[in-house]
Amino acid sequence: MPCCSHFVDMPRTEFTPQQRAAIYARDRATCCFSGANLWLLDTPLRPGYETDWADHVRPSARGGRSEVDNGVCASHTFNGKKRQNSADTSYLFENGIPTLVYFNIFGPLPAIQTARLRRLEKLVPADWFFNRALTSIFHGFDYRCRSERYDERPTRDDAYWFGAAYRKLCEFQNLAASSLEERKIVVNPSEIQRHWLALRDVGSIEQLQARLRPLYAVYRGNFRAWAKYFFDAETPAARKAALISAEKAERLSGDTLACIRADQRLRVR
């Protein structure tokens, strides 16, 4: 009787943190499916951020090994869309470089994205641990905002996420890579980026939480405007009112307002 084991799902294996870090740095913090920038230090302080994931080229459940060569950097969104579809390997980026598929569809890479990929070429695996600390902080901010606005109470609360962030920062400190400034990954940092960068030398969870307060104040204001427009508004009139409210809001980033205005322009004829 012929062997049919290749049709049976294999036990799933995961990449280690060290492997995920190596994949992330090799791929320049860029989603292979979409080209999204997964370096959170560049991300606006609002909802809609994308977190990084290490995706198996050949799925683990189909016998793919959890090795760096069988992994690609993907956003959480696109990793979820692929799941175990091993045929979905039409990548726009490989090793942080556009593929022929990208050029066939979009043509030349925009100059701003070329500059970003050259800058993020200098990432090292240690930087992934810093990025994952920021990921946990974003999740903690989300918990606070969603519990306040929608009374949601997931099992993993803000204390859990900030604790996870502190542990990742400690791992980042122990790896002792050369500074982001020396490698010119950060050039002329914004005020928000300076707050993020100040987290690199925190010595306690209490110190971390103290330094997060000004960042959370900005995130909370942007979350309110984002949620009011994109999540809560169900009619054209409600969206218009949410836009007017956003234009008057304090602590609102230009990026958040730009997204809301762009959506309104497409909806209004």
Image: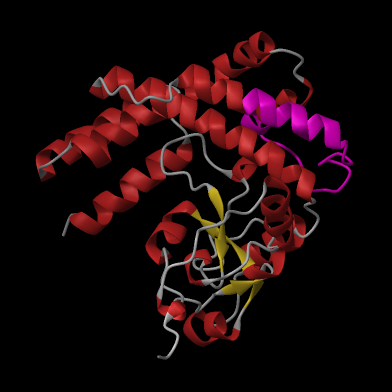
Residue 139, above or below 92: above
Residue pushed farthest bottom?
Answer: 1
User: In which quadrant of the rendered image does the C terminus lie?
Assistant: bottom left
Q: Residue at x 66, y 13 (%)?
A: 205
Q: Position of residue 183 (x, y in %)?
A: 86, 48
Asked if residue 123 lies left or right of residue 101, the reply is: right
Q: Examine the structure image and report whether residue 55 is included in the region drawn in magenta.
A: no
Q: Residue at x 56, y 43 (%)?
A: 43
Q: Position of residue 238 (x, y in %)?
A: 14, 36
Residue 197, above or below 106: above
Task: Please state the extent of the stretch shown in magenta in the rendering.
Answer: 165-193
Asked if residue 163 lies left or right of residue 254, the reply is: right
Q: Residue at x 75, y 18 (%)?
A: 202
Q: Residue at x 42, y 66 (%)?
A: 82
Residue pushed farthest front?
Answer: 1
Coloring basis for residues: secondary structure
Question: Which residue is more in the foreground, 132 or 15?
Answer: 15
User: In which quadrant of the rendered image does the N terminus lie?
Assistant: bottom left
Question: Which residue is more in the foreground, 268 or 151?
Answer: 151
Question: Which residue is more in the foreground, 245 or 20?
Answer: 20
Q: Position of residue 174 (x, y in %)?
A: 84, 31
Residue 186 visible from this viewpoint:
no
